Amino acid sequence: MTQPRTAEQLWRWFQRASIPSTAPAMQHQEMKKAFYAGMAALLAEMENFDESMTDEAGADVLESWKQELIKAFESFSVGGRS
């Protein structure tokens, strides 16, 4: 298994993939706030997982989130709304 990336590394990847280099500094700052808020929300939700949750149930939750993300990204790529 590879070493997990830090939040900062994930932010840098997201920044390079999503924000044009010509974007103003304010856009970078606001996108960074949104990125970290999203990470915080996800972490908070994962911390609320019940200890009695089975590995299979946990995997189901992660798969559900993955499918939601796929649908969201598809809507973004065709000019849809979130």
Image (spheres, rainbow, N blue to C red):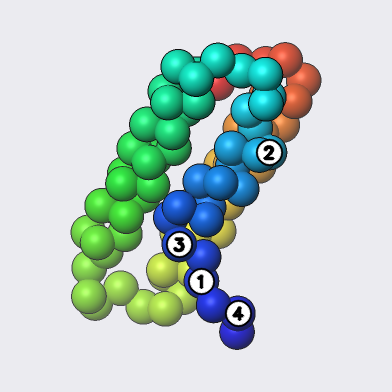
Compare residues 47 and 53 and report the one nearer the observer: 47
Residues 13 and 82: in front is 13
Query: Residue most toward the right?
Result: 78
Relative to 44, is 11 on the left or the right? right
Determine if residue 67 is in view. Answer: no
Callout 3 secondary element: loop
Q: Are marks 4 and 3 in contact (CB under 8 Å)?
A: no
Quadrant hosting residue 77: top right
**In the rendered structure, which amino acid carries the disc numbered 3?**
Thr
Tell me the number on the disc at residue 17.
2
Residue contact at pointers 2 and 3, CB within 8 angstroms: no
* Earlier sequence position, callout 2 versus callout 4: 4
Q: Are marks 3 and 1 in contact (CB under 8 Å)?
A: yes
The image's mark for residue 45 is none
Element marked by disc 4: loop
Which residue appears at 32% of the width and 55% of the height?
43
Residue 47 lies, in percent from the top left, at 24, 61
Q: How far is the residue under mark 1 from the one under mark 4?
A: 6 Å
Sequence-first tag of 2 and 1: 1
Residue 35: percent from the left, percent from the top? 44, 37
Badge 2: residue crowd in 10 Å (few <14, some 14–19, many ≥20)? few
> Label 1, on which residue?
4
**Image point 58% across, 51% down: which residue?**
66
Residue visible at 45% across and 17% down in the picture: 26
- For badge 1, the amino acid type reads Pro
**Quadrant (top left, top right, bottom left, bottom right) of the C terminus:** top right
Q: Which residue is mark 4?
A: 2
Other residues around mark 1 within 10 Å, as few (<14) / some (14–19) / many (≥20): few
| Residue that badge 3 annotates | 6
Please name the amino acid that badge 2 sits on: Ala
The amino acid type of the residue labelled 4 equals Thr
